[in-house]
Image: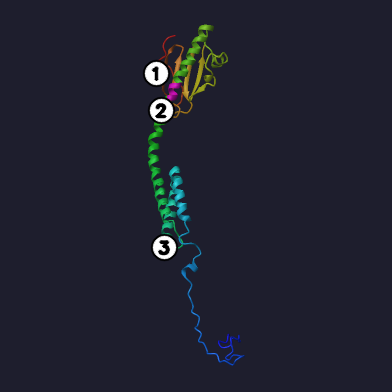
Amino acid sequence: MKCPKCQFINPNTASLCIKCAHRFQATKREPAMYAPPTQAAYQTHPSGSRKGLAIASLVIGVIGLFTLGIMGLGALIGITLGAVAISKSSSQPHNYGGKGLAQAGIVTNVISLLMVPVIGIIAAIAIPSLLAARAAADEASALYSIRQYRDAELNHFNRYGHYAYMKELIEAKEVPDDLASRQKDGYNFEISIGQASCEISAVPVHYGSTGRRSFYVSSKNLNLVHGADHQGERATETDPIMGSFGGR
């Protein structure tokens, strides 16, 4: 304690100055006031910093737009996460944020979920049409291939005086290379040879998907092609005439 009279520094507990005997006046000390901690002292995260649930909901929703809501299950999870994120951001705004992200996540997940039945309806209409178109194209290709086999048999007969087995035609290069495997565009081809007869048949490899009708050509009239739906079995000469190749 500093003496106001002689400026001598005395102990803090002294009531008189040791040097000049000046009496010190007693000073009243105010008790220390307790200041309660502010809300910020309890905050472990910045205001609204937790946005993980909202971001996860939005990410799942965006992915779901390209994956049909991950077959619906992903969309339901995304909607749930978005709802939980909105609830937490409303009840605990100081800790949880991303309400806008959560709302966007719910919207994208709902859209992806609604896309599932829409795409299903479109697929139910389009797929049968596509399969029918493919089967029709395979049948048309089979008719053209039968004509190529028929032309090869006619050429062989005119040159050698007899019809040839499939193996002979392939080895003699009398049929195109794409017919050498005896299978083309969803149809299997077979040639049956008698003493002076020839039968050429074509049946679908996978009945229904690569074609429904089977086709048949006989040496009795190689200009006529017969065909019918035989459930994947061979056609015969008793089947309706599908058309004529024209004389050669």
Q: Identity of the amino acid at label 1?
A: Met
Above or below, 102 relative to 71: below
Answer yes or no: do the residues labelled 2 and 1 have beta carbons within 8 Å?
A: no
Say which label, 2 or 3, has the lower sequence index.
3
For the residue pair 160 and 86, the one nearer the viewer reads as 86
User: Percent from the top left, x then y, of residue 92?
Assistant: 43, 63
Observer-side mark, 1 or 3, equals: 3
Q: Is mark 1 on a helix, strand or loop?
A: strand
Q: Mark 2 points at which residue?
A: 133
Q: In this view, does 97 lie to the left or right of 173?
A: left
Q: What is the x, y in percent for residue 236?
A: 44, 18
Query: Which quarter of the figure has residue 244?
Result: top left
Q: Give the range drawn in magenta.
A: 137-141
Whichever of labels 2 and 1 marks the residue nearer the N terminus, that label is 2
| Disc 3 target residue | 91
Location of residue 229 with respect to 153 vertically, above or below: below
Counting labels gives: 3
State the SS at label 3: helix
Q: Which mark is residue 242?
A: 1
- Give the percent coordinates (x, y) of residue 203: 47, 23
Q: What residue type is labelled 3?
A: Ser
Real-space Cα distance between discs 2 and 1? Answer: 19 Å
